[in-house]
Amino acid sequence: MTVAIHPPDTSPPDPTSGASPPGWLARMAAWCYDHRRRVLALWMGLLVLFGAASGAIGNAYQDRFTGGNAESQQAENLLKTKFPAFAGDTADVVVRTDSPITSASNEATFTTLVDQLKGLPHVAAVRSPFDAAGQGQISSDRRIAYAEVQFDQQTVDLPKAAIRRVIDTAEAARAAGFEVQLGGQPVEFVLAPSPGSTEFVGVSAAIVILLVAFGSAIAMGLPVVTALFGIGISYAVVAVVSHGLVVPTFGPALAAMIGLGVGIDYALFIVTRYRQALNDGAEPRAAVVHAVDTSGRAVLFAGCTVVISLLGMMLLGVSFVYGLAFGTIAAVLLVLGGSLTLLPGMLGFAGRAIDRLRVPGIRAAPSPSPHSVWYRWSRVVQRRPVLSALGALAVLLVLALPVFSMQLLFTDAGNDPAKLTTRQAYDLLAEGFGPGTNGPLVVAVDLRAGGGRAVVDQLAKAIRSTPDVATVVPPQLNDSGDTAVIVAIPRSSPQDPATKTLVGHLRSQAIPSVVGDTGARALVGGVTAAGVDAAQYFSQRLIWVIGGVVLLSFLLLMVVFRSIAIPVKAAVMNMLSIGAAYGVIVAVFQWGWLGSEVGVQKAPIDPWIPLFLFTILFGLSMDYEVFLLSRIREQWLRTGDNATAVADGLALTARVITAAAAIMFCVFASFVVGDVRVLKVFGLGLAVAVLVDATIIRMVLVPSTMELLGKANWWMPARLGRVLPNVNVEGRTHVEGHDAPRPRTRIPTA
């Protein structure tokens, strides 16, 4: 069965012909062009307004990576209610001395420091190594000791000024032969490594790429300025909303990373189409309308897919993920809005002068040629489609192999830059007492329904006898005697899989064997156990997020391209490129390959990163999928020849997509040189995925698989085709008579 299909007439309507008026994107672009001074003033006003608001109220970023009702959260809630003295987080003041710490002078200095810390605001208690409760806090060589500062609140609820007072007081005790370092979650929160200004490295690289692509300083500047407006406002927006949502300290930098990448790319596509329209003889106003009504449609669709995919993170029910997702969504929406409103106005200011201020030695970018090197390359691949597809598939599978050994656990302070006091305190504790000292387990025992001191003592003995437990602090009961606390020090570090195994063993065997039917209830909590619970939570939901994202991508592409094969192929290719990105992340950050060059040590992958990374990569991969396949489909509708359509579509989009991919790669890769491990992981993962998509996927897999599928690429069941909405991503592709009408094509359907 065949059905006659031809594309709708996409030339601008003649107002005297009674044709339908331009779409809303075209009308908006025309308004922004005509009122460009007002549009620019509006964006500048938004920048000033949100900047002033964030400056006035500051930010409330907090690194709280917990949520839900896991056992660790239940332990925290119990301690808050029944044992407030142990409900807060702890900080460690670690001292290393040249002479024995037990000498009279060192002990006096340490005791004075402890007394000073006890009197500070929000400090509930300080456990000194010279107290009875602090036995075991002096190393065997008598050169390292630590005091544990017990705050009266969790880190997220503590005033930064109170934590800073503790830090300043401890650091003031430093002297020759008396080294003082500080660790613990409260100190990490205040002294966390700054994301720095690595985004400026990416912007600088983007400027160079745009200069090469456009050959003009003015044409280069428009995408950069547009993206920076959106990022500047998003920084302020994220700071303001951090007072209502849990936004981690690296949240703004993550939002900036994604916003810069997509923002410059979105503007790049529109500016490229605008310059093409000018070269075809259109007036600047018509060229702006044409650019927004064509490439702007694809940009809008691409931006919406990124936002929709990020909204899927809201289903996890974890507070800090809400903050990260909202910040990134705000950045994407703002740069998208800038591309569709501010950019048309700025193009109005530039007019035909967009190609002035040319860069010496760089020729103006030629109009896309259907018989360029990309066309010839596509033909080379299409002549050997099986060999090409198998070769590309083999490379992707090799890159993805490390995924099968991925370990999902929260990383600890051992991954901080070596210059930070938190890292030095971590290393001192590991040297003097074992790595587990950096992540004690807090067992909260509820005795209200039964049991008593005898049960608590038996439980402490059972925990102490567990092979992977280094030591147990003597248990303490609250004043009413209905709640007890047992602090256990593991032998392994917080991020070691052995610690995760220990937490599971305590919960499933050691504790139940003592508690039994006594009525007592023991809950394993603390920062380390909370990280284990969160890792398990995210691991269980990874497959569901991936499945939901893949299904959504399939439905969106099926509607846009009215095909079954294309969305299936795209979903498989997206999974391959993301798998390759995951594999490289595991090899570098978990296995330690090239770790010294990247500036990281071997450690597990933070469990929320694969989920968040997948949703972002899904949206980004949809960008290039839409930009490329929409042109291929356009050529298919023109000619009805699948092989020619693929070659022509690749040739027509190669230059701009290559430039866009190079910009994204540089922006993302620039974050690898910073100090924040999380941003390093994101930067490398996103950069690898973009690189793979722009080379192996687009240059090899797309032409080879589409050649193998032939006309099946465009097959759609007739009944399904009649009920699906008709979404026109490319919009109006003619500029006032400069394109020839498209021929009618007969396409096979079921």
Image (cartoon, rainbow, N blue to C red):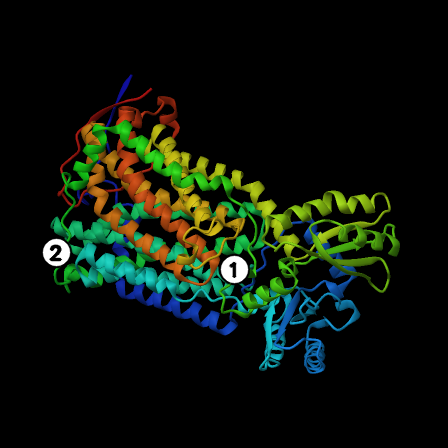
Identify which residue, 236 or 535, lies in the foreground.
535
Say which mark, if any, is on residue 741.
none
The image shows residue 694 at horizontal and vertical percentages of 30, 44
Residue sitting nearer the eye, 343 or 418: 418
The C terminus lies in which quarter of the figure? top left
- Mark 1 sits on what residue? 415
Q: Residues within 10 Å of mark 2 (few under 14, many from 20)?
A: few
Q: Could you tell whether 322 is left or right of 370 in the image?
A: right
Q: Dividing the picture into quarters, in which one does residue 14 lie?
A: top left
Q: Earlier in the sequence, mark 1 or mark 2?
A: 2
Q: Nearer the viewer, residue 144 or 693?
A: 144
Residue at 40% over, 59% down = 256
Q: Position of residue 321 (x, y in %)?
A: 53, 52
Q: Badge 1 local density, few (<14 within 10 Å), some, or many (20+)?
A: some
Query: Disc 1 to disc 2, how far (Cα)?
Result: 47 Å
| Residue position marked by numbered label 2 in the rendering | 363
Give the answer, above or below, for where 225 lies relative to 306: below
Side (left or right) of 471 relative to 32 = right
Q: Position of residue 460 (x, y in %)?
A: 80, 54
Q: Where does the N terminus fall, quadrant-wise?
A: top left
Label 2: element kind: loop
So how many labels did they put on this image?
2
Q: Nearer the viewer, mark 1 or mark 2?
A: 1
Amino acid type, callout 1: Asn
Secondary structure beneath disc 1? helix
Q: Is residue 82 left or right of residue 376?
A: right
